[in-house]
Amino acid sequence: MAWHKKPKTNLTKLRLLRTFVQFVMFILMNLTFFLIGATWLVLPVNMPRSIFSSSEGAFFLLQRMLSMAIVPLIPLTTFFLFGAILGRFFCAWACPFGLFQDILGYVTSWIRKYEPTQETNLNSRQFGEFITGATLLFSTFIGINVALGEKAAVETAFDVFVEQPWAVLSPSAFLFIAIPLLFWWGGIENFFIWDKFVVIDIIFWFRLFIFVFAFILVIYIPRGWCRWFCPIGIIMGHLGKNSLLGVGRNISKCNHCGLCEDVCPMGVRILSHPAEKVRSPQCTNCLDCIAACPEDAMEIKFL
Amino acid sequence: MKSNAKAFITFSLGIILLAIAISTNQFELIQEIIEEITKSATAGIPIP
C-alpha cells in the first residue's frame, strides 16, 4: 500500500511538488479571500463557489444552470476540453478536496490503509455514477419546472435543494463553505453557537454525517472519495479515459515488480492495462508510478 | 475507433460548445451569479 511503505526519494519529491502545486492552485482558486476578485473561471475540481472563491467547480455550475433552465455550455466546455487533453489531471494536481484527502492521508499515515480489489474499486464507482445521474436528473427536473413558470412551487417543495442539490450534501461544500462562513460571520468566539448561523435541522445532521463518513473513509482508503463518490471524477473519468495525456509502460524495461501499483493512490492495476497507455477511469495522472518505478519503465505519454 | 480520435472528437465538441457559450454571452451570466452569491453571503443569510 502506498502510504505505509517508505517511498523512494523520487516519489517523496514528486509528492512534495504535487502538494505544493495543489496549495498554489487552492490559493489561486480563492483569490477573493485575498481581495483580488472573483472570475468566470470554471475548473474540473470539487469546489463550489463561495464568497471567497475566484473560480468555481464545473459540476456545481452545471447543477445551478440546469436548475435555472439554462443550457450549461460553460461547464460542459470545461469537462470536454480538459477531459480530452488532460484526463483527470486536475484531480491529482489542483482539486482542493483532493488536497484535503492527501493531507488527511499523510497525517494519519500511521494508521493502516486498505487497498480494495480492482473489482471493488470499479464496482463502487456506481455510487458516484448514481450521485451524478440523480443530481443531473433532479436539476433538469427543477429547470423544466422553472421554464414552465412553476419556480415558486418547486422552491416551496424542495427548499434548499432547488439551486444546487448536490452542493447541499457535498462534503466539499461543507468544508469550503459552511465552515469558513461560520468564522466569517460569527468569529471564533461564536463558532460553537451554530444555531445563530446554521439552520440546525435534519439536513444539517445529514450533511455532517456525510462529511464525517468521507473523513473516515479517506483515512482508511487513500483518495476514497475520489475513487467512488466524486461526480467530477466520474464525469472526467469517462471523458478522460481516452485523453491525450496519460502514462505508459516500456515493456522492455518493466520487470513486473508491481511497485507502480503499490504506490498508486487510486488503486489502478497498472500492469493489467495495455503498456501503450493506462486507460483507467481512475487514473489521475498523478505520476507517482513514474517516480516510484525502479527501472524507469513508466513514462508520460502525450498523443 | 482509436483513443486519440475519441480525444480529438471530445476536444472539438468542447471548442464548439465554447464558441456557442461566447456568442450567447453565458460568461455574463457567471458574473451575475457571482454578484448574487456575494450579496446573499454578506447579508448574513444562514447557511441552509
Image (tube, rainbow, N blue to C red):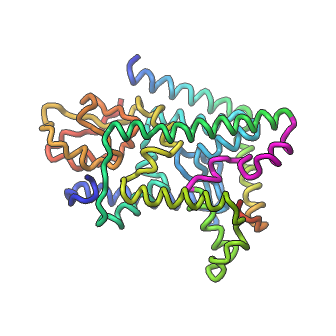
Residue A292 on the magenta span: no
Image position of A157 (left or right of A91): right
Magenta segment: A149-172
Residue drawn where x is 49% and y is 55% of the image: A97
Q: Position of residue A155 (x, y in %)?
A: 81, 47
Residue drawn where x is 79% and y is 66% of the image: B43
Picture layout, residue A27 above or below residue B4: below
Frontmost residue, A110 versus A66: A110
Q: Quadrant of the C terminus of chain A?
A: top left
Frontmost residue, A44 versus A178: A178
Frontmost residue, B15 versus A288: A288
How many discs mark residues in the rendered view? Answer: 0
**Where is residue A98, by image quadrant?**
bottom left
Q: Position of residue A250 (x, y in %)?
A: 19, 33
Chief secondary structure of the magenta portion: helix
Going by the picture, which residue comes out furthest to the front? A202
Q: Position of residue A68 (x, y in %)?
A: 76, 40
Q: Position of residue A112 (x, y in %)?
A: 29, 60
Picture layout, residue A96 above or below residue A298: below
Going by the picture, which residue comes out furthest to the top? B1
